[in-house]
Amino acid sequence: MDIHEYQAKERFRAAGIPVPPDEIATTAEEAEAIASRYGGMVVVKAQVHSGGRGKAGGVKLAKTAAEAREHASAILGMEINGLTVHKVLVTPAEDIDTEAYVGVLVDRKRQAATFMVSPEGGMDIEQVAATNPDAILKLTVDPRYGLLPHQAYWLANFLYDDPGLIKQTSRIVAQLYRSFVDSGASMTEINPLITTPDGDVKAIDAKMSIDDSELFRRPDVAAMRDSSAEPPSETKAREAGLSYVKLDGDVGCCVNGAGLAMATMDLVKYYGGEPANFLDIGGSSNPDKVVAALEIITSDPNVKAILFNIFGGITRCDDVANGIVEATKRIEIQVPIVIRLTGTNEEAALRILEDAGFSAYTSMDAVVEKAVQLANA
Amino acid sequence: MSIFIDSDTKLVVQGITGRDGSFHAFQMMEYGTQVVAGVTPGKGGQSFEGPDGAAVPIFNSMDEAVARTGANTSVVYVPPAFAADAILEAADSGVDLVVAITEGVPVLDMARAHAFARDKGVRILGPNCPGLLSPGKSKVGILPAQIVTEGDIGVVSRSGTLTYEAVFQLTNVGLGQTTCVGIGGDPLIGTSFIDCLEAFEADPDTAAVVMIGEIGGTDEQEAATFVKTSMSKPVVGFIAGQTAPPGRRMGHAGAIISGSAGTAEEKIKAFEENGIAVAKRPVEIVDLIKEALA
């Protein structure tokens, strides 16, 4: 789960990291009022779960409150990478001396939280890694000890020469690690971490992604979810316990298992179609789940055909077939449905589906080809 | 032979009294796995009834279970909130292999568990994996027994049902398996593709390997290099997620393209550049294995 910049900054402040003040506006008038309270120059920043906000025109400097109002009015409602901006953050503009990058993420190879820091802040760290890898220090934290004081010092010492800056930054990276762990994060970033002409170190941007598996034990973090930042169908899927990602195609996919669901989408593409979604219905034959899945898929107006691909392992195919028949009695479907079931009790499953008037298949290729043909018809 | 488990595997089921634990303990016993103990804190002294009235003793703790039964492997069906503790307990108890089925274990909990297990020299498989099955010998986890048959193909995969799909197709044309291993869909997993490839290479009964990967991370890319430098046996590959958009988690917590890294495209390229024949569709896996063995 991604959280917004202003929410990540709240987490940072709670951990003691110096972050300039800010307020959130949902209208241009509010932005103007906030800017005039701060006085002086402010920055108006789009709050969306996407990188590249600056390039998209979602971050603007305003010299006056009236200008803040104009910028907010342009940014609110703007689309950045397909996401509509509903909120802007207004914060006093800082005098910047230098910009550094500080990030923590769960490194898969090192199997632990790993810091990445670079004196080349303010730009995409992937770009720095590609063009100037020596400008990045990577440091893996042993999860049993946490970030040790000397490690915090090493990170800070890599960024700055000035003892005062090093001292402040050692504290900030330790606080960032604490915030990372206490938030159940999978990634957090300060980019840039700035120094000011007065010799202060501050975080003027903040990014954080939360490990979904942490949410059950962190209600304060879970409460930060912004459902307006995702399609309503994804909210509904999550509430129904389904894994769903909306895509742009027209073949609705309903599959058991994440790997098989991805392979099914790929096969749709292989046969000249475009998948409308990723959906993993899990191992259940429960008709309620099938109903929820069908409601979610059919709520997408682009869907022209629905494709089921079920591998019956421990779950029996005939149970799943009964679930599908039961579900389609409860909800009216306007588009054709084709179903493929294979594995345990597949013959019984095919009979159940054919008796109910469905086209049923045992071959994954045959059913995907059919679904693409129906969607393109 | 087989890898990681065989007929000498003596298994403890952690969470044997839960819904999933009890169901799968029964299934594993039916398959012939030696389930020697169950562990559920607070239920020590009770017993679990398997097929044909077979009784499995239940213990409060892993150290007791191992001391009393000589178990060498454990399987974890404990809910996510307690799974990492169960894995740590298992790694501390004297077993060599801990198979973690549970999905949704917090990643930072697993970072601690993996570090601990590495120091103890204990292998963790998973979490968020279907386990493994050596046909005719032993099954640990949730793989459906009826889709496998004995033979000389090794199968290793990050996925569940996609693995079943591939294994079932192999079985249907008479290509049996030495061991089918699901390594799990999480970002931090205990046993990598390379660990499995190394074991298959060393296993005299395995003639060829099917490796099924997906988007996210670089485990497949490293495995591809390993195949080229350290394997004599043919490896056939498949990668799921060519149509997955970047930055979105595709079901598995580990199936996510981060920035520009971990795409299906780069994994397929790594496979092809290192002599791994890549199936464009799951159905082609069987043909490629047949060619590799011809």
Image (cartoon, helix red, strand yellow):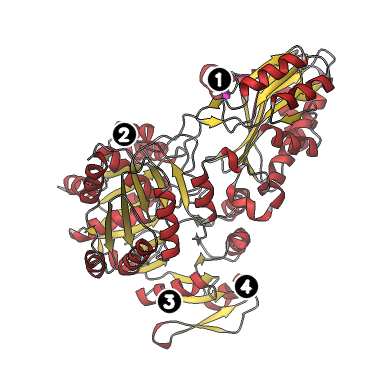
Q: Amino acid at mark 3?
A: Phe
Dot 2: element: loop
Which quarter shows the N terminus of chain A?
Answer: top right
Label 4 to label 2: alpha-carbon separation: 46 Å
Residue on which disc 3 sits:
B26
Query: Which mark sits nearer the N-terminus, 3 or 4?
Result: 3
Q: In the picture shown, does residue A62 fall above or below A76?
A: above
Task: Give the image location of residue A290, x and y in percent.
Answer: 41, 60
Work out whether residue A39 or residue B3 is closer to the camera in this orientation and state it: A39
Q: Which chain does the residue under circle 2 lie in?
A: B
Q: Which chain does the residue under circle 4 lie in?
A: B
The answer to the question of whether label 4 and label 1 lie on touching residues, with beta carbons closer than 8 A, is no
Tell me, yes or no, if residue A247 can be seen here.
yes
In the rendered image, residues at marks 3 and 4 fall on the same chain:
yes
Q: Which chain does the residue under circle 1 lie in?
A: A
Query: Which mark sits nearer the N-terminus, 3 or 2?
Result: 3
Mark 1 or 3, which is nearer the eye? 1
Label 1 to label 3: alpha-carbon separation: 57 Å
Residue on which disc 2 sits:
B274
Mark 3 or 4, which is nearer the eye? 3
Q: Going by the image, does A161 lie left or right of B170? A: right
Mark 4 or 1, which is nearer the eye? 1
Label 3 to label 4: alpha-carbon separation: 20 Å
Mark 1 Cα-neighbour bin, 10 Å: few <14, some 14–19, many ≥20: some
Q: Amino acid at mark 1?
A: Ala
Q: Residue at x 34, y 52 (%)?
A: B162
